[in-house]
Image: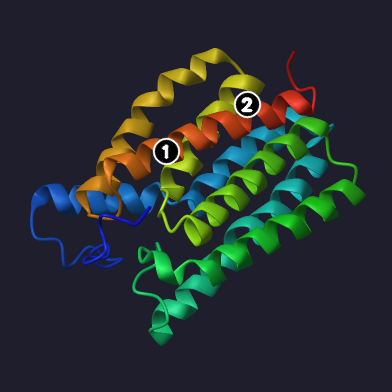
Amino acid sequence: MKDTITSKAEKGFTGTEAETTAEKVAHYISVAGNPLFIALPLFFLVAWKTAPDWAHALLWWLITAVGVTAIPFFFIRRGVQRGTYTDDHVSVREQRLVPLSVGLGGMLIVFLLLVLLGAARPYLAALTSALVSLAVALSITQFARFKISLHMVGITGSVTVLSLLFSPWFLLLSPLVLLLGWARWQVCAHTVLQACLGLLLAVIVTWAILWLFGVFS
């Protein structure tokens, strides 16, 4: 399946090229909803809930922040500066293989380190759900030639993790998922189908991984 949006990448990381108020608002929502950024508060909360003390929680979170967020973010930022990638969201599907592979590699290293450090099962489950979701998304992007929305994968997976690990009340955050989906469509980064399939992928993978880890019955 080919992308139906191929002629137009997302308008600049700073939003300076946005032409309308809706585009400007959508751009800043897209930046805030970057899955690399969303991972930071998500794993902080999960570490706080599952670690035996604050020292362990901070250690797990810092390792995750470096491997899951910092390394891929600065790798992509450097690529944008060199002209390798059009924007910080790597909006062009053909450019996604290398940066997503770097992100996947960083997550795998983080997982192995946390296993060695004896991180809690729920924390490893949340990390594994993100890792598997990214791996599936990368496979779809590369082999099916379909640019599934990683923003939707990230925010939907986060809401699902919080709902299963903390409380179903976190489902009240679901409107944020719809808001981010609108923003990605508004900046011409994704079609409605690409956003919806990202949402569906995240729910299925996250629920399945947490269930396999025995986080809930």
Query: Disc 2 and disc 1: Cα gap in Å?
Result: 15 Å
**Residue 207 screen position, x and y as percent:** 63, 26
**Residue 6 screen position, x and y as percent:** 26, 64
Q: Mark 1 — residue? A: 197
Quadrant that contains the C terminus? top right
Image mark for residue 131: none
Q: Quadrant of residue 27?
A: bottom left
**Position above or below: 42 against 135:** above
Q: Mark 2 — residue? A: 207
- The 10 Å Cα crowd at callout 2, few under 14, some 14 to 19, many 20 or more, is some
**Residue 98 screen position, x and y as percent:** 56, 71
Residue appearing at x 53%, y 29% in the figure: 203
Residue contact between numbered discs 2 and 1, judged by CB atoms under 8 Å: no
User: Can you tell which of label 2 and label 1 is closer to the viewer?
Assistant: 1
In the rendered image, the residue lying farthest to the bottom is: 82
Residue appearing at x 82%, y 42% in the figure: 56
SS label for mark 1: helix
In the rendered image, the residue lying farthest to the front is: 1
Residue 107, visible in the rendered structure: yes
What amino acid is found at the position of numbered circle 1 in the picture?
Leu
What amino acid is found at the position of numbered circle 2 in the picture?
Trp
Relative to 178, is 63 on the left or the right? right
- The 10 Å Cα crowd at callout 1, few under 14, some 14 to 19, many 20 or more, is some
Relative to 103, is 30 on the left or the right? left
Relative to 11, is 56 on the left or the right? right
